[in-house]
Amino acid sequence: MRKRRENVYLDNGATSFPKAPGVGEAMCQYIERVGRNVGRGSYAPAMDAAGQVLSVREKLQKLVNAPSSRNVLFTPGATWGLNLLLHGLLRPGDKVLTSPMEHNAVLRPLEQLKARGVEVELLPCTGRGELSLDGLEEKLTSNIRAVVLTHASNVSGNLFPIGTVGRLCRARGIFFLVDAAQTLGALPVDMTDMGIDGLAFPGHKGLLGPQGIGGLAVTDALAAELEPLVSGGTGSMSESLHMPPFLPDKLEPGTLNLPGIMGLGAALDYLLEQGEELRQRERKLARHLWYRLKELDGEGLRVLGSDDPYNRVGVVSVDFTHADNAEMAFRLEQEYGIQTRCGLHCAPLAHQTLGTFPQGAVRFSIGPFTTFGELDYMEGAIEALL
């Protein structure tokens, strides 16, 4: 085993690190040099800040091909966006289809809604966590209000056939909601082409921005059906006690996280500057991670998820078959400096599907700044522990 490395960070599935160059500087510059609110003042610095916020909206709109910049809303993260979608859309008597591979950001709101009379049906998945499309068209009947799916599992790393499902939903007038927490920034997402009505995403993962800022992109048809989950001041229609009926104000009450938006804007500038080259490198890293771990499959660990390295994101979880997963994750950090995520990953039904409940698994997840050498080092460390 080669010399111990310090801080080999393989937990980008939780949050990217390091952030894109310029993120911290942009946040600091706003706090120290601007500091004004937007939508509440007509003086020059406030108007300049509003222009910067609009610029970030426009960049996100182009990134996901949303209908317009006003259809892009800022949220504290993907969880908040998913709650806005689910609680804002579903009513007693509605039926929604989802999968057992979802994060608790989907499953917990749906569990609350079940208690209020919403019917939830889980679509079938294989033991590797792959969505089965058999019989899906027959399930998409007129009584289905929405389908909500992850774009990629935060446990198995499997990509879901979002485009296929979305186009089926659109042809039948069913709302299609997507959790892009593990994909946006790393993979192309096109709302129009994929038939997506509501897209929730964080700023702090694939987009390489700060924590506490994310987004929600919606079609006009979906926005018209959404009831605001939170109400308050918007700086518009202040004479009314009702939320404005237009976007983004309808779903964006209160003071925005302006430092976070500025940081996210800097991250988007970096991603745009790097272009496809950065995304190609990340996809190569994702496959390299999978190949390194698959070389050890059956030698004291089991690699979860699809066996197709081209249908995955840079997330691979393993179950140590002859050792405690938490102990192995601890030893990887203590003895080799490798930082991972162990547990149930806020996705208990996914672990039940994959056969790793209740013990959980150890998750390795790369980012664009991970190196191929770090992944080779990781494989050697695991091999030594085994």
Image (tube, rainbow, N blue to C red):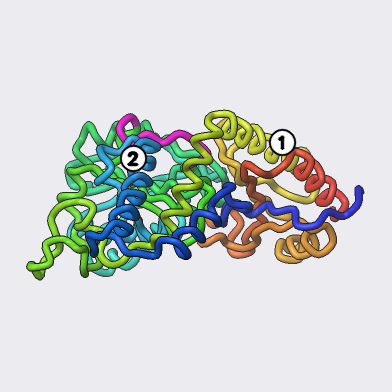
Which label was assigned to residue 291? 1
Q: Position of residue 203 (x, y in %)?
A: 46, 52
Q: Secondary structure at mark 2?
A: helix
Does residue 15 belong to the magenta stretch? no
Kindly indicate the quadrant of the structure image that contains residue 140. Answer: top left
Q: Secondary structure at mark 1?
A: helix
Question: Which residue is painted at 41% across and 36% down in the image?
Answer: 189
Residue under numbered circle 2: 61
Q: How many neighbours does mark 2 have within 10 angstroms: few (below 14), some (14-19), or many (20 or more)? A: many
Relative depth, front residue between 30 and 105:
30
Q: Position of residue 216 (x, y in %)?
A: 33, 51
Does residue 187 belong to the magenta stretch? yes
Question: Which residue is painted at 34% across and 51% down in the image?
Answer: 53
Q: Is residue 86 visible?
A: no
Q: Position of residue 175 (x, y in %)?
A: 24, 44
The magenta span reads 185-193
Give the mark, 2 or 1, whose residue is nearer the N terminus. Answer: 2
Question: Which residue is painted at 29% across and 56% down in the image?
Answer: 44
**Type of residue at label 2?**
Gln
> Relative to 145, is 32 on the left or the right?
right
Question: Which residue is painted at 59% across and 47% down in the image?
Answer: 21
